[in-house]
Image: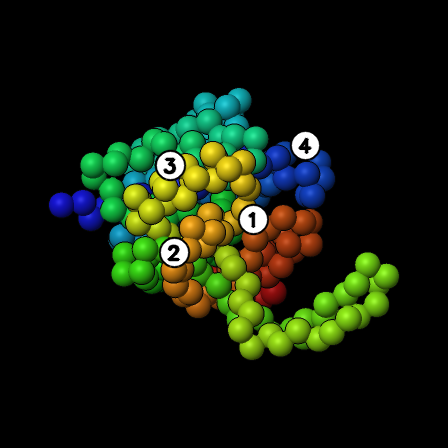
């Protein structure tokens, strides 16, 4: 009986918002590539049995030589070519999943280095129960709806608003169906659970952490260094 969880890590982005020529997933945090931090958390998760990494075609050999081999990642079993957009990279990774042996597919951003094994475990368990699940945090700031003229139209009730993060997890068949339908319709979501939502399936929410940041801008690196130092018990 299938009971395995496989993680798909889309890491084919070029990181244009970061500036420079190095893709953001290969920039260093605490002297180590951001991607390595993310993979370490997945590797340490007892419920994740294998990791499929989706990277730019030109970087597949680099990832094997500079990321997987030197850092000793045993669970990274496949490195596939990513796509033009993140959703394409996830679809390519999903296509490499062994359908006969996998029950749950977990997707995690390469540039969210502060995910924890506990977070992974909880979202996988929720996906197994409900079909799909997302790590998210409650909206704490006051939210304003602003018109095209730059003037506030109203204050939005934040009571039911959550900020989606990754990891996100799915029963395999449901996730495959969602991606097939999105591909047929030419639909691109802003995250993976949106593909499932649009088919009317339920998605459970698992509370995450404010530390589970996505590093997309230069200032995020500074925040990341502070989080890393705090976790390591150093003075910030």
**Chain-order first, disc 3 or disc 4:** 4
Which type of secondary structure does the marked residue at label 2 adopt?
loop
Q: From the image, which quarter does the N terminus lie in? A: top left
| Residue drawn where x is 71% and y is 36% of the image | 20
Q: Is residue 221 left or right of residue 207?
A: right
**Chain-order first, disc 3 or disc 1:** 3
Where does the image place residue 122, in percent across and percent down from the top left?
A: 33, 62
Residue under label 3, please give it: 94
The crowd level at tag 3 (other Cα within 10 Å; few <14, some 14-19, many 20+) is many
Where does the image place residue 186, in percent across and percent down from the top left?
A: 54, 36
Q: Is residue 147 above or below residue 142?
A: above
| Residue drawn where x is 62% and y is 59% of the image | 223
Which type of secondary structure does the marked residue at label 4 adopt?
loop
| Residue drawn where x is 53% and y is 22% of the image | 58
Outermost residue on the right side: it is 149
Is residue 195 at all visible to an observer of this figure?
yes
Q: Which mark is residue 201?
A: 2
- Would you say the residues marked 3 and 1 are in contact, meaning their CB atoms lie under 8 Å apart? no
Residue under label 1, please give it: 190
In this rendered view, identify the residue nearer to me: 113 or 126.
Answer: 126
Residue under label 4, please give it: 21
- Gap in angstroms between the C-alphas marked 2 and 4: 40 Å
The crowd level at tag 4 (other Cα within 10 Å; few <14, some 14-19, many 20+) is few
């Amino acid at each position: 009986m299938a009971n395995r969880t496989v993680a798909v890590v889309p890491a084919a982005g070029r990181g244009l918002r970061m500036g420079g020529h190095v893709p953001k997933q290969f920039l260093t945090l605490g002297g180590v590539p951001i991607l390595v931090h993310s993979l370490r958390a997945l590797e340490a998760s007892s419920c994740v049995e294998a990791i499929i990494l989706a990277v730019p075609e030109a970087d597949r050999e680099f990832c094997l030589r500079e990321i997987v081999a030197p850092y000793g990642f045993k669970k990274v079993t496949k490195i596939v070519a990513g796509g033009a957009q993140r959703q394409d990279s996830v679809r390519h990774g999903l296509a490499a999943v062994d359908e006969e042996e996998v029950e749950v597919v977990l997707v995690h951003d390469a540039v969210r280095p502060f995910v924890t094994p506990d977070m992974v475990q909880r979202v996988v368990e929720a996906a197994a129960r409900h079909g799909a699940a997302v790590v998210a945090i409650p909206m704490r700031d006051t939210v304003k709806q602003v018109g095209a003229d730059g003037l506030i139209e109203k204050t939005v009730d934040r009571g039911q608003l959550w900020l989606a993060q990754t990891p996100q997890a799915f029963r395999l068949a449901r996730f495959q169906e969602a991606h097939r339908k999105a591909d047929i319709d030419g639909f691109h979501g802003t995250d993976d659970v949106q593909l499932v939502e649009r088919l009317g399936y339920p998605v459970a929410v698992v509370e995450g952490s404010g530390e589970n940041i996505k590093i997309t801008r230069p200032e995020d690196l500074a925040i990341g260094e502070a989080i890393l130092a705090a976790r390591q018990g150093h003075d910030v």
